[in-house]
Image: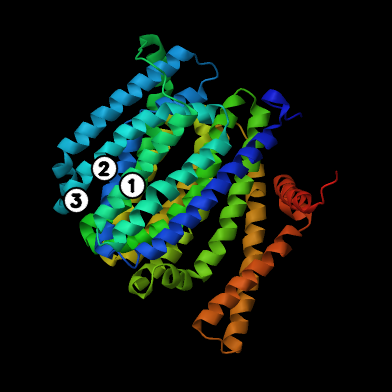
């Protein structure tokens, strides 16, 4: 079976070329954000972080509801024209304006949901973000549809560096607390808007076509429903922790969540961002769709599994190094949330395939069941503290992944016998790194190494295990795993190869 796409490039080239650029940008953003977090953890208190986490919960949910899936609809449809784009632009701006006003008017009611009346002025300040997101939506969709992933990576990286970190650090140092975080978030959205507008200026004029709106909303509403429920599920634990355990507990939980889940979540978003437009372009070709899904799932699970092991082994060292000794209560939640990296990352692949094949209402039903289980688990766990909540959240993440994967493989008529092959490289890699890490810990204890020396030895042992993973025979990795390993080795050799004139 050939794997050619538009312009003569293969599906694998499109996927990996896009993933390379987005992964590069995502990695840079993660490093900048982590470096910023290291400083902020020493300038801003857990309670202040908790208040900001409550504010961002509203922003994250409203971002999806305010767009009703118009931008993804432009990406998913094979044929669009200027009327479609202008209609989407007009609707996005109008809806964003409505949400900006609604959040401003109902800030008191939203604050009451969290039992945190002090967040009202912050909510009204961040309401402007919704309007900027509405202005940015069409440019984002056009860039993604054109598969200009390098440009998207540059915009995202610049917005984090110039709009967020360069703003939040001096303001936090001056003692602005929550306002430093809020103003930086607004700054990041503003830089994103300006840069996207440089690449894809807004279409001049206002135009609305009812027939175009119907076509877009037929997909967009379903997409928005599925994504909104997933986003609410992603924020429900914040609401429960904030309401039942207070701002300080939410601050600790949100930093543990941000330090691990939010950063590694970007790995899944990387796959999703690239996969959605690529899989949408081959949605009517089942064999190529299954091939793209299999390779993407293999890569996602492999990367996530290799991250999980050091997160769990080095949780105490990471929290103390990144956040400081005043955040030791975040160590156990951090490790427990780390056990959910694999299902969270892999479910991004499932979501991208459901969206590309327009099976949105099935996805919405699955997300609703996940939301129900998550709320129930968090309510049951909350009286036992943050550790119990973190464990419950991770357990629900695994349950959701198992159900989601079973349904999607049946709906797409994929061979379920291939599922183990998708997981095999990640499982073997994680097992090898775990064994080497255990040997490193045994050596550290036996030699009487100090606390930080033990952490360094553990990290070194896990890094030394990576070449062993790449040398595994192909028959142990399955076809997709062998392809992934061969691709990585080929890229490394090509990079090191001398250039000939």
Is 201 positioned to the left or the right of 435 in the image? left
Identify the residue under disc 1. Answer: 185
Whether residues under marks 2 and 1 lie with C-beta atoms below 8 angstroms apart, the answer is yes
Residue at the right extreme? 501
Q: Secondary structure at mark 3?
A: helix
Work out whether residue 375 can be spotted: no
Q: Nearer the viewer, mark 1 or mark 3?
A: 1
Is 27 positioned to the left or the right of 11 in the image? left
Q: Secondary structure at mark 2?
A: helix
Quarter the C terminus occupies: top right
| Residue 74 x, y percent position in the rendering | 47, 23
Quarter the N terminus occupies: top right
Circle 1 packing at 10 Å, graded few (<14), some (14-19), many (20+), is: many
Circle 3 packing at 10 Å, graded few (<14), some (14-19), many (20+), is: many
Identify the residue under disc 2. Answer: 126
Q: Nearer the viewer, residue 12 or 333?
A: 12
Count of picture labels: 3
Is 3 positioned to the left or the right of 443 in the image? right
Residue at point 35% right, 30% down? Answer: 134
Residue at point 15% right, 42% down? Answer: 109
Residue at point 45% right, 33% down? Answer: 196
Residue at the front extreme? 501
Q: Earlier in the sequence, mark 2 or mark 3?
A: 3
Residue at point 54% right, 36% down? Answer: 151
* Mark carried by residue 312: none
Circle 2 packing at 10 Å, graded few (<14), some (14-19), many (20+), is: many
Q: Nearer the viewer, mark 2 or mark 3?
A: 2
Q: Secondary structure at mark 1?
A: helix
Q: Earlier in the sequence, mark 1 or mark 3?
A: 3
* Mark carried by residue 119: 3
Work out whether residue 79 can be spotted: yes
């Amino acid at each position: 079976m050939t794997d050619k796409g538009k312009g003569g490039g293969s599906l694998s080239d499109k996927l990996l070329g896009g993933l390379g650029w987005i992964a590069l940008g995502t990695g840079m953003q993660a490093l900048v954000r982590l470096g910023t977090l290291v400083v902020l953890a020493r300038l801003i208190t857990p309670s202040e972080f908790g208040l900001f986490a409550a504010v961002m919960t509203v922003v994250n949910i409203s971002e999806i509801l305010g767009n009703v899936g118009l931008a993804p609809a432009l990406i998913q449809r094979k044929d669009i024209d200027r009327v479609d784009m202008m209609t989407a632009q007009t609707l996005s701006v109008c809806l964003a304006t409505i949400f900006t006003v609604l959040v401003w008017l109902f800030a008191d009611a939203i604050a009451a949901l969290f039992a945190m009346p002090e967040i009202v002025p912050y909510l009204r300040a961040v309401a402007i973000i919704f309007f900027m997101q509405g202005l940015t939506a069409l440019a984002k969709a056009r860039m993604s549809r054109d598969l200009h992933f390098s440009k998207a990576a540059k915009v995202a990286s610049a917005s984090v560096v110039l709009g967020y970190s360069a703003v939040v650090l001096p303001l936090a140092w001056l003692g602005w607390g929550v306002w430093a975080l809020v103003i930086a978030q607004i700054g990041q959205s503003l830089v994103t808007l300006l840069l996207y507008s440089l690449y894809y200026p807004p279409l001049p004029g206002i135009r609305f076509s009812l027939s175009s709106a119907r076509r877009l909303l037929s997909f967009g509403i379903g997409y928005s429903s599925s994504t909104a429920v997933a986003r609410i599920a992603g924020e429900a634990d914040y609401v429960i922790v904030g309401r039942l355990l207070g701002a300080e507990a939410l601050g600790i939980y949100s930093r543990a969540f941000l330090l691990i889940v939010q950063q590694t979540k970007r790995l899944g978003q990387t796959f999703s961002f690239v996969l959605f437009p690529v899989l949408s372009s081959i949605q009517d070709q089942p064999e190529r769709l299954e091939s793209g899904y299999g390779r993407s799932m293999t890569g996602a699970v492999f990367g996530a599994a290799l991250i999980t092991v050091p997160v769990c082994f080095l949780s105490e060292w990471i929290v103390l190094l990144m956040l400081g000794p005043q955040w030791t209560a975040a160590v156990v939640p951090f490790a427990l949330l780390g056990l959910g990296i694999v299902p969270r990352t892999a479910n991004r692949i499932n979501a991208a395939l459901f969206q590309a094949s327009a099976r949105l209402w099935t996805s919405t039903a699955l997300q609703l069941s996940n939301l129900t289980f998550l709320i129930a688990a968090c309510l049951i766990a909350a009286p036992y503290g943050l550790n119990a909540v973190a464990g419950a959240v991770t357990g629900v993440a695994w349950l959701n992944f198992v159900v989601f994967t079973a349904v999607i493989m049946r709906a797409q008529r994929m061979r379920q016998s291939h599922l183990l092959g998708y997981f095999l490289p990640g499982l073997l890699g994680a097992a090898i790194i775990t064994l080497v890490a255990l040997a490193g810990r045994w050596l550290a204890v036996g030699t009487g190494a100090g606390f930080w020396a033990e952490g360094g030895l553990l990290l070194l042992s896990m890094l030394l295990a990576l070449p062993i993973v790449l040398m595994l025979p192909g028959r142990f990795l399955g076809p997709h795993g062998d392809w992934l390993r061969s691709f990585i080795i080929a890229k490394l050799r090509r990079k090191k190869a001398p250039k000939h004139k």
